[in-house]
Image (cartoon, rainbow, N blue to C red):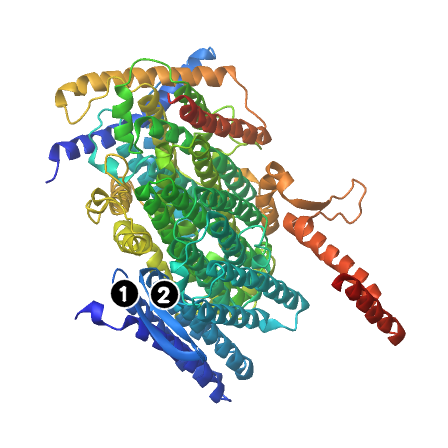
Amino acid sequence: MNLAAFPSAEAAVGIGVSWLALGALSLLESERARFITRLVFPASALISFVLAAVSLSAVGTPAQTFVLPLGLPDLPFHVRLDSLSALFLFLLGICSLGINIYASGYFRGEAAGKLKLLTLQYHCFLASMAFVLLADDAYMFMVAWETMALASYFLVITEHRQSAIRRAGFIYVLLAHIGAISILLCFGVLQDGGFEGYSFDALRGVELTPFWASVAFLLALTGFGAKAGMIPLHIWLPEAHPAAPSPVSALMSGVMLKTAIYALIRVTFDLIGSPLWQWGLLVAVIGALTALFGILYALQQNDLKRLLAYSSVENIGVILIGLGLAMIFFAAGHPEAGALGLIAALYHALNHGVYKSLLFLGAGSVLHSTGIRSLNEMGGLIHRMPHVAFYFLIGALAISALPPLNGFASEWLIFQTALQAGQLGNGVLRSVVPLLAAMLALAAALTARCFVKAFGIAFLGQPRGKVAALAQGEGHEHLDAGVCERLGMAWLAIWCVLLGIFPSTVVGVINEVCIAVTGAGLPRSALGAGVLWLVPSTQAQASYGPIVFLIVIAAVVLVTYVAVRGAFHGRIRRAPPWDCGYPEQTARMQDSSEGFGQSIRVIFAPIFRISRRVPGPDDLQPKFEVQVEDKHWHGLYLPVARAIDYLSSKVGLLQQGRISIYLLYSFITLIALLVFAQ
Amino acid sequence: MIDWAGIAFQILQSVFVVLAAPLLLGWVNQCRAWLQNRRGPGVLRPYFMLWRLFHKEAVIAHHASVLFRATPYVLFGCMWLAAGIVPVLATDLPFAFAADIIALVGIFALARVFIALAAMDIGTSFGGIGARREMLIGFLAEPAMLMTLFTAAFLSGSTALTTIVEALAHREFAIHPSLACAAVAFLMVLLAENARIPVDNPATHLELTMIHEAMILEYSARHLALVEWAAAIKLFAYMTIGVALFAPWGIAEGSDWGALPVAIAAAALKLALAGAGLAALETVSAKFRVFRAPEFLGTAFLLAVLGMLVYFLTNA
């Protein structure tokens, strides 16, 4: 079949429309929730699969465009499917496939009435993400973007009876709109005074002066950064992601944040065209700070889903470092190094989508079957839910950037990009780029600690608090996830492994995207090394072969196991834990979630806002409390909110409620105007 | 075209490292005993200990999970791979393409995460605190190690360890300021990563400040043997990385069988000296409080970054 002739763009739009139709269909059935869980979500998963297949086949083919006769008169929707859109649609496809399968198990047992609305919003959310990626004019883009924000807002406030969740939704929608205004202004600046229409083709044609290009870029960075969770605009993310039902959290963290990355790349590399190095430096520095802040805050969280949300902030930072490096190198005239950075960023976006979805689903299964969010109430879940523990472990290893899983491959590429710093002529850049690599290394190592904490405290050890109580009660065999939930997680876990051990294939595909966006790609020597080796330029310079890596470790483990068992014996005796001979061991003596964060609090104390309550020596009911809050909240948002409150109270003085006073205002205004008009 | 000579070299070197690693550990312990006016247990003691442990019956806590039992094997596998990648005798190592310096740090991180998780598996107070401290050491030592290696990578224009060693072995005999900073940082990382004084004390047990020992308290018999052996290989690998980066002379380049005896002699001599040096260092210093360890490693990190910046400022 000739792939180039296949109408992928039309097919992708059809997929978006059929998601909308599925959502509407779920409204028809009024009585049974089974219809939705058994039919709608599996059908939706099938659509995801088609989307993944169609978009993967479209990577590397010429862009396809067509015009949808919808929208306002004279302003039809322009649709375009090029390699960049296709890559992100592929991400949407594979993530939503796993999440949909999972959701068909997860939502069983929900009341039909609530589930109907949720299903409609869920599918609107999916479809609007697809349309954001397909839009080829500012008008359709903004419509899809706002639909995405609103659909996800309603999903976030599913449990709207809790005031904390309503508050989370409010903060989310507030920042989403600040971002949207910024994006709208950005598109306005890109018009550069004239009006050639809203289509991206027209915007591409406009030549901006460096000043106006920078203004447009800053507006885009603010707008899309607010959606992506870049500091200091990340504040909504740790509130909104945990509030939503887990499959929705997975979609928001795994895919929705990536649409912002997509849009940033689209505007910077495609619409504006030639980035300046100052932008790259700004993006990379913000990225490094985001990565570090994100993971340090993640380490302080006790709520598993909040921890995952903060870790998303960290990963967005890592992606931004890659993007920033790409901009720096492209601007400095080193397209090969720039391409490497862009590929690394795109690769990391793909990876983060997969493993973060997986981790949110794992956390969802725990929440679903135990009702527990706090790490300090968990423990020993590996015995109760072995399947969930296994998939969560894969996700945790992948996100900790451990070889041979996928997170390592993309961070490796970012390090390789940073190591090209020697090519740069500018002395400042040459010393800043390695510093960024140092910060990335620190963030990556902290991630490992964070996920040792998350997995270790939730799944290992002895059951604490509520889990221990559950173990005593009825039905504790059924704690593990159901078949659908397991299948959904298994699908994502397989991608974590596949993306990790075939990095050269992945890089080959993303390289096509990079060529389509920037016109530059990796050197030929990089791509010819074969499927075994991931090589950024030449093999003598650097290479990484995860398959060899995996085979050697697996072979050694196997041989050692057989040899040790064969040469000696395999006898095992079970006994109580040794623990240096202390006989009294209770679950409360284990390290807690706060305990794991304690040394971080001490070392990085200035970063946090910590309030402690330490009991005195003569306290009869001693209680130790520590609370860590986001400094941005108190340092930035509350002062701004207070200033706005203050200003509005001053403006409110004008409002007296007496007609004579208002008439006086009119009179004064008239006099003033008459004076000025002269 | 399969490079059979290279693969032979590769396997030979891996086996050599795995077998020789306990000897180095024995040598360090023996030197330390001499420096402390003790007779010492002899350099072969670690082998006897491994042999004895392999014969014992494994005692495992009631609620230990699969993860706990699998970890010693994973550790051993990781360290074996590390032993295959670090050029000890020769630089022609086909496996070395599987992992450059960044991936090497990744291997050590993988091993660290697994042992920390295994330590938390039983749910004892010591296990948890050991895991927490190990990850504390880890998140500071890992970036410092990466920065040290990046300095060498910038000097030689490559992150492949074999290429770095070949490039550094041919430089003129002069002190590069950037490498000097990196060397000091590397030494500090080596001490921390291998649970040596002043960060941890390998000789201690039942002490509230222990780190590595706290994590492996619940292991016994063959599992403990594998963990200890893996630790010995790790020390060996770190020492050889140090030797390869900062004193690479004498290593056999390519698969030159003729140069092998010289290479073995050179490696043995350098490692014996390094081991004695480590023992001396451990004898004259005292263990830090746990909370001084971050300062120690923070210094290492800053030194390593400084070394890298010095390279960019002076190009040397």
Q: Which residue is mark 1?
A: A58
| Mark 1 / mark 2, whichever is N-terminal | 1
Query: In the picture, which quadrant includes the N terminus of chain B?
Result: top left
Under mark 2, the amino acid is: Leu
Q: Is residue A393 above or below residue B252?
A: below
- In the displayed structure image, the side of residue A92 where residue A221 appears, left or right: right
Label 1's element? helix
Picture residue at 54% right of the left edge, 61% below the top: A185
Disc 1 with disc 2 on a shared chain: yes
Label 2's element? helix
Picture residue at 42% right of the left edge, 31% below the top: B147
Q: Which residue is mark 2?
A: A89
Q: Is residue A110 above or below residue A415?
A: below
The one nearer the camera, A511 or A31, is A511
Subunit of label 2:
A
- In the displayed structure image, the side of residue A398 where residue A659 appears, left or right: right
Label 1 and label 2: CA atoms lie apart by: 10 Å
